[in-house]
Image (cartoon, grey):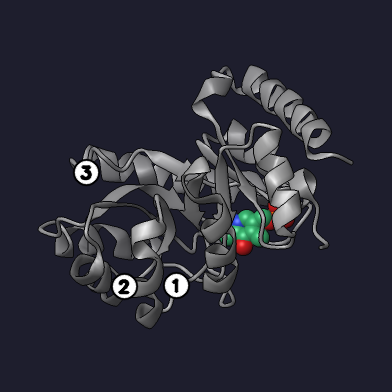
Amino acid sequence: MDVAENLNTIQASIEQACRIAKRNPEEITIIGVTKYVSLERTEEAINAGVVNLGENRQEGFMEKYNHIGDRAVWHFIGSLQTRKVKDIIDKVDYLHSLDRLSLAKEIEKRSSSTINCFIQVNVSGEESKHGMQPDEIVPFLEEISTFTKVRVVGLMTMAPHTDDRAVLHKVFRELRELRDVIKNKGYSSCEYLSMGMSNDYEIAIEEGATHIRIGSKLVGSNK
Ligand SMILES: *Cc1c(COP(=O)(O)O)cnc(C)c1O
């Protein structure tokens, strides 16, 4: 399937989910996750009108970034090793995986401009998942409140692999509620919710997602 067709299908289902949730589809940003696909396929996505691109590894990020540059808005969505921060941070528009103080400190030290960050939260409590525990977020925000290069724009989570819609609703709802608690404590810039992937983005939208990260259903999953 070409990316343009896939994008049409996804946009139609976003509109459907927004009707259910009484939301405006313009609130939703589609991030095309290109980690599985070639540069050619990534170019096809750009030509189809995908503006936001996401990569989860430094190597893949650099390969795509070096060719595409400022024709895209760049999202880094994978866990980021502290020692790699200096190589990529000035190319990243949004970091979705801020998950520890040492990473925030390294960004503060290495970045030449303010980086928009989502704090990654392990809502489901699965051992295998990266991210901070929900009760760690407010203390963390206090610790980084004087940082000038780290701007927290929202929260990100990955749902467990399941077809159980009730479980998915619960995980996404909990992230939204956590965001609300944080905003009410005065962290007003923390407004976005990066949640929802190919298999669960409609549910995420019903629960308030503002940024959905779509790989396989948009660009495919083999090179
Ligand atoms: C791979 C990946 C995605 C996209 O996954 P699909 O199921 O292919 O849509 C989204 N978010 C993160 C963090 C990923 O690593």
Counting residues from the N terminus, which is met first, the one under dot 3 or under dot 1? 1
- Quarter of the picture containing the C terminus is bottom right
Q: Secondary structure beneath disc 1? A: loop
The residue lying at 46 percent from left, 48 percent from top is 175
Taking depth in this image into account, of 134 and 67 the one nearest to the observer is 67
Q: Gap in Å between the C-alphas at discs 3 and 1?
A: 24 Å
Quadrant including the N terminus? top right
Q: Nearer the viewer, residue 168 or 33?
A: 33
Element at label 3: loop
- Residue situated furthest left in the rendering: 146
Label 1, residues with CA under 10 Å away: few <14, some 14-19, many ≥20:
many
Residue 82 percent across, percent down from the top left: 36, 79
Q: Which residue is mark 1?
A: 80
Q: Are the residues flagged by discs 1 and 2 in contact, CB closer than 8 Å?
A: yes
Earlier residue among tags 3 and 2: 2
Using residue 95 as the reference point, say whether residue 28 is left or right of it.
right
Whether residue 31 is visible to the viewer of this picture, yes or no, is yes
Q: Point out which mark residue 187 bears.
A: 3
